[in-house]
Image (cartoon, rainbow, N blue to C red):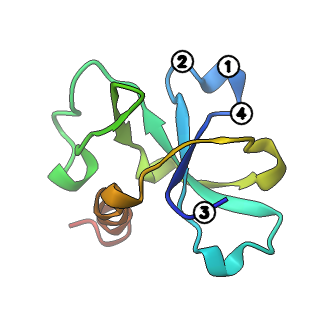
Amino acid sequence: MAQFDAYENPNVPQRAAFPYLVVMQSDQFSHFSTRFSMPLARLPRPPADAPRRLAEPVEVNGEKVYPAAHLCAAVPARLLRRPVLSLRPRSDVFLAALDAVASGI
C-alpha cells in the first residue's frame, strides 16, 4: 500500500460520486492501521468556482476524476483491497490540492 496508490472506494453508497480514494499518507507511516486518503470525485465538468489547484483532473481507468482534498479522511487500511493504479506520476496534483485547502491560495 504505497503513497499515491488509487483504490476503489470501499464505501459502496458513495462510490457513484467518489469512485476512488488516493492514499496520501507517507509510506513512513505504513505501520498505522489507517491511511490518510483523498477522494476522487466524478464530475461532469471541472468545478467552475474552485481554485485551479482544486480543479485539475487525473485519469483513472479512462475516466477523468477530480481531487476532493477538502474531504480527506483516515480510512481503515484493511478496507483498501487492491490498488487500481499508482498515481505517483501525478502526485503534484494531489499535493497542490492539499496545499490549496490548507493555505487557501
Tag 3: Cα neighbours inside 10 Å, few (<14), some, or many (≥20)?
Answer: some
Are dots 2 and 1 in contact, CB under 8 Å?
Answer: yes
Dividing the picture into quadrants, the one containing residue 89 is: bottom left
In which quadrant is the C terminus drawn?
bottom left
Q: Which residue is mark 2?
A: 16
Q: Earlier in the sequence, mark 3 or mark 1?
A: 3
The amino acid on which the numbered mark 1 sits, given as a three-letter code, is: Pro
Q: Which residue is mark 1?
A: 13
Are dots 1 and 4 in contact, CB under 8 Å?
Answer: no
Left or right: 101 as drawn, with respect to 20: left
The amino acid on which the numbered mark 3 sits, given as a three-letter code, is: Ala
**1 or 4: mark nearer the eye:** 4
Q: Residue at x 54, y 18 (%)?
A: 16
In which quadrant is the N terminus drawn?
bottom right
Q: Earlier in the sequence, mark 3 or mark 4?
A: 3
Residue 70, given in percent of the width and then of the height, sits at 44, 51
The amino acid on which the numbered mark 4 sits, given as a three-letter code, is: Pro
**3 or 2: mark nearer the eye:** 3
Dividing the picture into quadrants, the one containing residue 11 is: top right
Q: What numbered label is drawn on residue 10? A: 4
